[in-house]
Amino acid sequence: MLKTHSCGALRREHVGQEVTLAGWVNRVRAQGGLVFVDLRDRSGIAQATVDVASAPDAHAAATALGREYVVQIRGIVRARPPEMVNPNLPTGEVEVEITAVTVLNAARTPPFDVSTESKVDEALRLKYRYLDLRRARMQRNIILRAQATKFIRDYLYARGFVEIETPILFKTTPEGARDYLVPSRVHPGKFYALPQSPQQLKQLLMVAGYERYFQIARCFRDEDQRGDRQPEFTQLDMEMSFVEREDVMGLIEGLMTALVEQVSDRELVTKPFPRLTLKEAMARYGTDKPDVRYGLEIRDITDIVGTGGFKVFADNAAEGKPTRALCIPGSGDYSRKQLTELEDMAKAAGGRGLAWMALESGGDGQIKSPIAKFFTVEQLVALTERLDAKPGDLILISSDTPAAVCAVLDALRREFGARLGLADPKQIAFCWVIDFPLFDWNADEERWDPSHHLFTSPMAEDIALLDTEPGKVRGQQYDLACNGYEVAGGSIRIHDRALQEKIFGLIGLDVDDARQRFGHMLEAFEYGTPPHGGIAPGIDRLVMLLAGEPNIREVIAFPKSQQAADLMAGAPSEAEPKQLEELHIRLAEDVKDEA
């Protein structure tokens, strides 16, 4: 080994020992004949010093060091004088008195300072990701991720799970997003698909009798990027046989509780996890992934304002469209410009506009609003009571289709949760959302689409409705939300071939098409398939929340950019003509040029 100790390991008990350290130069400071070298490795920082009088050669070598040089230092551990102790550094009570310095590798001046958390353009960080990963925050994040995945593995092994890998090259099947296709050289004109999830394979493992399976699975989806998405991502993929919904949810609740409490420094504020039906979640929060760290709940006021003189509310009520509102505490003094910004925000979320009422501070909280004149005193009193509005509060109102109203008020609720500091960033709050419809109606295709995936089992008591009212059938689906993100989704699966074929028919898959795409599944179901169910928590999103980061790129070692590009390596890139020829592929522009 080129070092006897890690830089971050030195403590007062090492005083007097001769040590050899190796790492990166974090900083060099010269003070007359004395040079200070802060040496960094993954474990932390150690301060070393060299005096020109006692070690002139080492002093000369230390003076010539640049930031990010890789060096080896030998010396004696000394206690720092009391006035020089650094209480903010774990190694702050000691320093190394240098006797020799060896440069193992010099370094160019980095394009940004890796020794601090200064703001750096993300594109630059991604281009030089190997440097960005040296920064203390990024190292904490990546190590936290490793600790989280180890904890998950240990937790599941202790509960009888078997870790099994499934193929990366599989068959293209519809799962809600576009597949990444991989052309086959040995089978011209045919393609593998990178798995969006190992859904079918983990169900087949249940048919195979493994009963409790998991893997830390790599998954791929060709979809538009955002802060909590990547084209390649990692999920904890799980499946269990002979279980019901409560069994899966109970195991995951125990895992998530232990993970937060034992691996992170976050505060878990919801034990046991609240359970919301989809209908309740949409009504109270406007989303199926609510942030329950704070209140600020939506209230339906259709019955109050739908009979007033304001035409928009009245017409919408007559058409069965809701009017709902949020009461924003202490924001009744918003200016016209600020209110216009909120209206623009509502329109960006898909609404047609936004109505507002401000309760003046002091006195009796008289209402100021361009629409207040359309309502009676009794209606305004009922409205403020429904929303528990007080003097100084601001009421924001949306009236439209249920989907548009939910989208608008969800966006505003999140905005004011952040503006008013209602969500403590140190807190973690999980909640379950259940009772999803099994199908969504696709008006363009005039067919039912699965709301989760093709293999979700209907609630047993709703199976009879498949033939008469499919839209009323609930799926045995369960989603886990955390701090406003969906972090896991799962369901009890269909294990009966006849029922699976009926579902295929309802979503427009004819018998031949179903057999071509899922023949292996249907055939397997004829060989003794146990009842089973599973779930797939997203590792990236979970670690993002545990680390308190704003997006998953901060907890992935080598992520893609918002445009799904690898700025460091230059991927995606063009293929060589010979490669395309071997794969029997011709580019569209080449064909066009030939024509």
Image: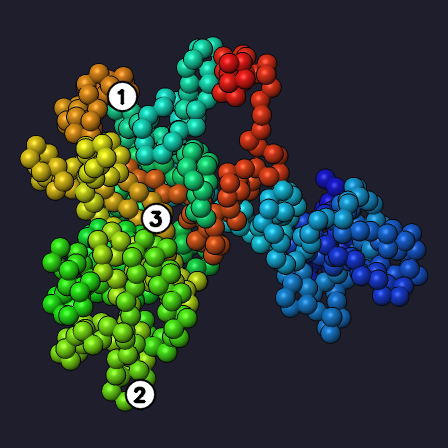
448 relative position to 28: left or right: left
Question: What residue is pinned by disc 3?
Answer: 486
Query: How far across and how far down the image is residue 227, in percent?
Result: 45, 48
Is 514 located above or below residue 489 in the figure?
above
Among the two numbered marks 1 and 2 on one chain, the one whose residue lies closer to the N terminus? 2
Amino acid type at circle 1 is Phe
Question: What residue is pinned by disc 2?
Answer: 362
Res 235 quadrant in image: top left
| Contact check, label 1 and label 2, Cβ < 8 Å | no
Number of marks: 3
Question: What residue is pinned by disc 1?
Answer: 518
338 relative position to 48: left or right: left
Packing grade of label 1 (10 A; few <14, some 14-19, many >=20) is some
> In terms of secondary structure, where does tag 3 sit?
strand
Query: How far across and how far down the image is residue 508, in percent?
Result: 20, 27
Is 380 located above or below residue 491 in the figure?
below
